[in-house]
């Protein structure tokens, strides 16, 4: 599978198609190798965008390794008491690839950059909306601290 083109700035730095937002969500993933799917493994995202995420793993994965990533995309719905919000949402499973893998400072874990290859349009839109809401919540909370 050819690597997707990642645009570079004049300084040579990567320019992402989607802006990443700091976000810790539970992530499950399964490695795909030669028509074999590994058992599900769990992780947490470090940041996320509509185009991918970073996460931590206790094992290194090779760049271009294909994964099936399952994530819970929350939606905020207000309960009858408007001060209380409960998180609902839906699961999305997306074919993804490991873009990069780097050891963390503890060297027991690895930080992975994951690119979504096949996120359904409605899941991508739901994820974008959720990330915009999260960003606004974060900005508003800073105004009052």
Image (cartoon, grey):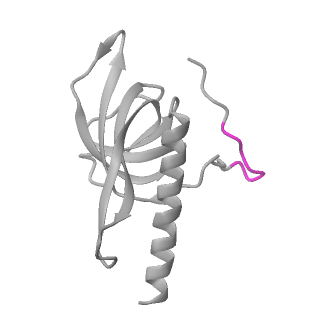
Q: Main secondary structure of the magenta part?
A: loop
- What residue lies at 43% left-to-right and 81% top-to-bottom? 141
Classify residue 113 by image quadrant: top left
Instruction: State the residue lying farthest toward the front.
Output: 80
Instruction: State the residue lying farthest toward the right.
Output: 10
- What residue lies at 35% left-to-right and 9% top-to-bottom? 35
Say if the magenta span includes residue 77: no
Rendering coords of residue 108 (x, y %):
23, 46
- What is the number of callouts on the image? 0
Residue in the foreground of this view, choosing between 129 and 25: 129
Rendering coords of residue 119 (x, y %):
50, 34
Q: Is residue 110 visible?
A: no
Task: Please give the range of residues in magenta.
Answer: 6-12
77 w.r.t. 111: above or below: below
Q: Is residue 14 left or right of residue 104?
A: right
Instruction: State the residue lying farthest toward the bottom.
Output: 145
Rendering coords of residue 68 (x, y %):
37, 28
Say if the magenta span includes residue 7: yes
Rendering coords of residue 40 (x, y %):
23, 30
Residue in the foreground of this view, choosing between 87 and 3: 87
Classify residue 102 by image quadrant: top left
Instruction: Classify the position of the N terminus by image quarter.
Output: top right
40 w.r.t. 7: above or below: above
Instruction: Classify the position of the C terminus by image quarter.
Output: bottom left
Classify residue 59 by image quadrant: top left
- What residue lies at 44% left-to-right and 90% top-to-bottom? 144
Q: Is residue 73 left or right of residue 44?
A: right
Q: Is residue 47 visible?
A: yes
Instruction: State the residue lying farthest toward the top.
Output: 35
């Amino acid at each position: 599978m050819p690597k997707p083109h990642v645009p570079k700035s004049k300084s040579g730095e990567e320019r992402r198609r989607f802006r990443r937002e700091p976000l810790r969500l539970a992530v499950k993933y399964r490695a795909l190798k030669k028509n074999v799917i590994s058992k599900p493994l769990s992780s947490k995202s470090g940041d996320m965008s509509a185009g991918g995420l970073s996460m931590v793993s206790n094992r290194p994965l090779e760049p271009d390794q294909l994964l099936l990533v399952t994530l819970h995309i929350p939606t905020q719905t207000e309960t009858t008491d408007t001060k209380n919000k409960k998180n609902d949402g839906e699961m999305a499973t997306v074919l993804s690839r490991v873009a990069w893998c780097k050891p963390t400072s503890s060297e027991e874990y690895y930080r992975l950059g994951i690119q979504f290859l096949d996120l359904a349009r409605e899941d991508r839109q739901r994820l974008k909306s959720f990330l915009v809401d999260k960003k606004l919540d974060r900005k508003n909370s800073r105004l009052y601290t």
